Image (cartoon, rainbow, N blue to C red):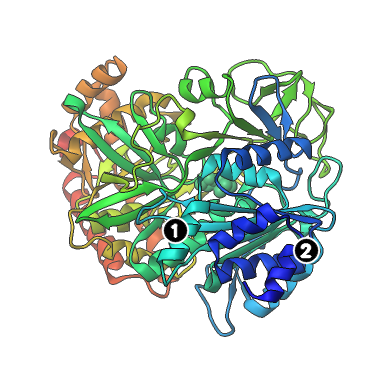
Amino acid sequence: MDEKTLQTIKEKTDETSLAKLQAIDNDEVNAFIAHAIELCAPQEVVICDDSPEDVAWIRQQAIDNKEELPLKTEGHTVHFDGYFDQARKKDVTKYLVPKGVDLDPKLNQVEREEGMAEMEALQRGAYKGRTMHVRFFCLGPVNSDYAIPCLQITDSAYVAHSEDMLYRVGYEEFKRQSAEKDDFEFFKFRHCTGEVDDRNTSKHPDLNRVYMDYTRNTVMSVNTQYAGNTVGLKKLSLRLAICKADREGWLAEHMFIMRVNGPDDRKTYLAGAYPSACGKTSTAMIPGENIVGDDLAYFRVIDGQFRAANVESGIFGIIRDVNKDDDPVIWDCLHKPGEVIFGNILVKDGEPYWMGMGQELPKEGMNHVSTQWHEGMQGPDGNETTPSHKNARYTLRIRDLANADPDWDNPRGMPLGGVIYGGRDSDTNVPVREAYHWDHGICTMGAMLESETTAATIGAEGVRKWNVMSNMDFLSMSVGKYIQNNLEFAKDVERPKVFGTNYFLKKEGKYLNGMRDKAVWIKWMERRVHGDVDAIDAGYGLIPTYEDLKKLFQAVLEKAYSQDDYVEQFTVRVPELLAKLDRMEEIYATVQDTPETMKNEIAEQRNRLTALQETHGQYISPLDL
Ligand code: SPV
Ligand code: MN
């Protein structure tokens, strides 16, 4: 370490902390820490390693400084974010781009020098009187091809504690990679809580900014507590990982990974991308199957196999509607002693409550609105408030879930049998379909993914939003290039089958499927991966036969599945399908670098559907195909 850097760090740390840094002995690490000290002016700097003592210390810090409040059940705490800081904010999340660079007109960007000046002004002196935590974590399994070491600087013990639950520790990984690799590369995050009120929430949510310096693998955020903006390894890292994957020829995806249990102990791994509120976590948590991860997946070719690893070691899940009957495994974890952080729920007498938990909620208590919330209370914006926020969350460790796949941490990841794209769609797609081949799936399922807004989102209900691979919010390159990368990935090896799901088909305002039916679709996909069952060509993909579904409904749900239900659910809705192609052609006409393959797949889909329309009409029963 050079003398100046050493002095800057030494002034704020004790010898134990300093020794930990010296053991890593990396100039870029030291420079990032020294710069944070100079910029943010902390009272002290604490550097943690992977030891259980350091991990426990951080957890206690979060409680001592009241970022987390203990609940009645041992190990449970609650954390509150400010009223205006309950989710990721797209308008203040921007890429810092070098002069003259345009990543894509669809992405939020600011010229690097300008954005950096704004960010540094907001972060200057932000750690005054506070402790700067320096933490080392790892995205993906340590000591694996997937591993990306990450350096997190934050003055929030809640952020550091959340990262202990959601990610693998990475101090030893830093030491190893720094010593072994000439081209050692890591991600860096600097988060500043900013000025806070007596509830530890931002006084200046309007000055919340999240800026990605993708050319330097760095993300900075300020004036926010919400984990989606502060926990560097979550969505901040996904944006950097998409860039890195582009440089290195692999894929970083916004997907769950699950193990589906087939006949004779067969284990089949599926990954799935679903926009918010489309059943992503509940699919990964289907009873009888096993979860690997619920949010971030890296795809790589290893030893000639298409494999995927869970980037995380925990779940930051939506708690709304988690109830005993539909989510018994999560419910159990949220009620037994053990480490859980609840976020933005309602607390009464030390017990957590949330909307949709299947029991009556107290009419008053402590929540994100007030320490003395009561029913009918208005928020600072004059809107009526709810007992828990619609985006209220829980944070827990995968290993604490009874259905965790014992292999979830495998450094080689999992061989993928299938990739699923699922959206919320009331009138177009059948509940489950299979692509003809990889390119067809990537283009017509992944790149054409749409989801309808729900009552829970701001604005009109039922508006379709285009969301490429459910990764639109995190793309750090042009849309066309990202699709092209997907098309080209793993060209020389056997690729997974691609499926499209839709749990939200409606007739006259009523859902055509029950919550549990997805357990059947998942089993059908598993059978298709191994060629156990036949499928019918529906012009825009392959759909199940009635006989196969009837058997699976009986076996999985002990439910009699009628032929009428099948016909209704699996009717090919040609006008809606063609309208979707029209929408997509319109959208992709505005994407400058739409791959030729994409244009061809859309055109071929249109040809197949119009040909079907001529012979079979507008609404085609699967029995007539
Ligand atoms: C999502 O919104 O996709 C999440 C939660 O997984 S957040 O951390 O906000 O990204
Ligand atoms: Mn997510």
**Rendered location of residue 301, percent (x, y):** 26, 57
How dense is the environment of label 2, judged by Cα within 10 Å: few (below 14), some, or many (20 and up)? Answer: few
Q: CA distance from mark 2 to mark 1?
A: 27 Å
**Rendered location of residue 10, percent (x, y):** 73, 63
**Rendered location of residue 319, percent (x, y):** 58, 31
Residue at the image point whose x is 53% and y is 24% from the top: 333
Q: Give the labeled residue for mark 1.
A: 176
279 vs 41: above or below: above
Residue at the image point whose x is 77% and y is 20% from the top: 363
Q: Are marks 2 and 1 in contact (CB under 8 Å)?
A: no
Q: Nearer the viewer, residue 272 or 415?
A: 415
Q: Nearer the viewer, residue 129 or 77?
A: 129
Q: Earlier in the sequence, mark 2 or mark 1?
A: 2
Q: Callout 1: helix, strand or loop? A: helix
Residue type at mark 1: give it.
Arg
Q: Give the labeled residue for mark 2.
A: 11
Residue type at mark 2: give it.
Glu
Q: Nearer the viewer, residue 11 or 620?
A: 11
How dense is the environment of label 1, judged by Cα within 10 Å: few (below 14), some, or many (20 and up)? Answer: some
> CB at mark 1 closer than 8 A to ligand 1?
no
309 vs 545: above or below: below
Q: Callout 2: helix, strand or loop? A: loop
For residue 553, which quarter of the picture?
A: top left
Quadrant the N terminus occupies: bottom right
Quadrant the C terminus occupies: top left
Residue at the image point whose x is 57% and y is 58% from the top: 151
